[in-house]
């Protein structure tokens, strides 16, 4: 699935909104699952993975939860640990029979632009006139 709007590719938040619009079941609206994911902290940054913008899609059905997530870099040495912590955090709130599938994805690549506004401000990053952050 890919958004064909050229403006979306230039703005990652807009791109992800287009992807969510094409497949509404991927939208990150299930707070009952986002809450435990906020307990997963990226140790290199010291911020939770939801506010970091590392969770790209979260899809829930009766018997399965699918997570598409990324890392700040494909070479991130903490990748396996973060995937395991995501699974543990979800396992704490889901019935045992619910399957958890976690997939690392690299498109679109993560940038600080995907971080929550509050986290960007915490790091002293502000958007320039194009909407880009450093």
Image (spheres, helix red, strand yellow):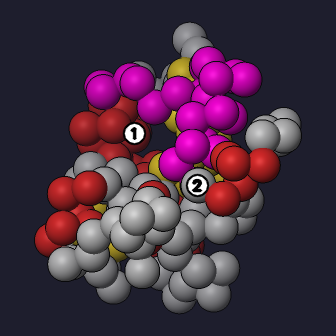
Is 27 colored magenta in this rendering?
Answer: yes
Whether residue 86 can be seen here: yes
Q: Earlier in the sequence, mark 1 or mark 2?
A: 2
Q: Secondary structure at mark 2?
A: helix
Residue drawn at (59%, 55%) of the image: 11
Where residue 77 is drawn, which disc sits there? none
Check the image and name the residue furthest to the top. 62
Where residue 91 is drawn, which disc sits there? 1
User: Considering only vertical position in the picture, is 81 above or below 100?
Assistant: below
Q: Quadrant of the C terminus?
A: bottom left
Residue drawn at (66%, 79%) of the image: 74
Label 1: few (<14), some or many (≥20) within 10 Å?
A: some
Q: In x, y percent, where is residue 59?
A: 58, 27
Q: In x, y percent, where is residue 20?
A: 62, 29
Check the image and name the residue furthest to the left. 122
Q: Main secondary structure of the magenta part?
A: helix
Q: In x, y percent, where is residue 21?
A: 64, 23
User: Considering only vertical position in the picture, is 113 above or below 103?
Assistant: below
Which is nearer the eye, 1 or 101?
A: 1
Does 68 sit left or right of 94 as displayed? right
Residue drawn at (52%, 70%) of the image: 111
Q: Secondary structure at mark 1?
A: helix
Residue receiving disc 2 = 12
Does 8 sit left or right of 62 as displayed? right
Q: Which portion, as a residue range, is magenta?
A: 12-32
Label 2: few (<14), some or many (≥20) within 10 Å?
A: some
Which callout, 1 or 2, points to the residue nearer the camera? 2
């Amino acid at each position: 699935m890919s958004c064909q709007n050229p403006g979306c590719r230039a703005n990652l938040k807009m791109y992800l909104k287009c992807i969510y619009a094409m497949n509404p079941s991927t939208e990150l609206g299930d707070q009952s699952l986002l809450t435990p994911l906020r307990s997963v902290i990226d140790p290199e940054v010291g911020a939770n993975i939801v506010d970091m913008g590392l969770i790209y899609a979260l899809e829930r059905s009766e018997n399965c939860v699918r997570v598409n997530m990324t890392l700040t870099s494909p070479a991130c040495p903490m990748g396996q640990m973060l995937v395991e912590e995501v699974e543990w955090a979800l396992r704490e709130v889901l019935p045992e029979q619910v399957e958890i599938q976690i997939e690392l994805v690299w498109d679109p690549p993560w940038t600080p632009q995907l971080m929550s506004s509050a986290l960007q401000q915490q790091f002293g990053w502000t958007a320039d006139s194009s909407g880009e952050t450093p």
